[in-house]
Image (cartoon, grey):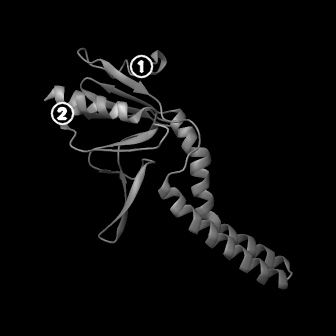
Amino acid sequence: MNEDIANQFNDELTADERIEWCGKPYQGIFFEKEDIVRLIPNLVFSSLFVFIFLRFFLNIISFLGTVVFIILSTLVTFSAISMLAGKLIIGPWRRRKTVYAVTNQRIIIISGIENRNIKSIRLNGLKEINVSYRKNGKGIIRFGNAVETPWDSRYTTHLYYLVERNVYIPEFEMIDDVKKVYNLIKKLQNESI
């Protein structure tokens, strides 16, 4: 067990609680299947839009044409640019500030770029665990039911009464030996019953 990571949980543990596993998410850049499915159409549409408007505005060579082209192409490509920025800059920065722990009683996630955010999930109340992993052993463990919140970065979007809402699902994102951690959580759950 990594002592530097384990020490970050000292203030969160109760007297009879002990850390069974702790870790950090993968620190590099990675894309999930869902990201690629969203990113490719955004990039294709943005590129097409820029190409069409570039052809149109180059025929009307004027200062106003250039300004309108820059504004419109920036607005259209904003979603692709923001998605790439999130994956290439914000994601790795956020993961650098995130640590995970599994204790004999609960799962603890400490994260936050500016503020320290602590998410605690009791093992005996956890009803749902979803695991996905890659061939290299790295993977994601998602815990429990979704909790609606507009502020968290990991979310899925649902349409509910025609209003878009962000739904946060607590998770261990791209950890090493995900099957080992999953089996440990299941074992601890059985012991706590």
> Front-most of 90 and 1?
1
User: Within 10 Å of the Cα at label 1, are there few (<14), some (14-19), or many (20+) other Cα atoms?
Assistant: some
- Work out whether mark 1 precedes mark 2 in sequence or the reverse, and give the earlier one: 1
| Image quarter of residue 163 | bottom left
> Front-most of 187 and 120?
187
Q: Secondary structure at mark 1?
A: helix
User: Within 10 Å of the Cα at label 2, are there few (<14), some (14-19), or many (20+) other Cα atoms?
Assistant: some
Mark 1 and mark 2: span between their CA atoms?
22 Å
> Which amino acid, mark 2?
Asn
The residue wearing badge 2 is 124
Left or right position of 115 against 74: left
- Give percent across and percent down for residue 135: 47, 42
Please identify the quadrant where the N terminus is shown: top left
**Which residue does the image show at 57% across and 50% down from the upper left?**
86
Q: Secondary structure at mark 2?
A: helix
The residue wearing badge 1 is 6
**Which residue does the image show at 51% across and 37% down from the upper left?**
95
What count of labels does the image hold? 2
- Give percent across and percent down for residue 134: 46, 43
Q: Residue furthest front?
A: 135
Left or right position of 89 against 14: right
Q: Is residue 75 above or below residue 96?
A: below
> Front-most of 16 and 25?
25
**Which residue does the image show at 36% across and 24% down from the upper left?**
21
Q: Is residue 143 above or below residue 164?
A: above
**Which residue does the image show at 52% across and 39% down from the upper left?**
94
Left or right position of 101 against 192: right
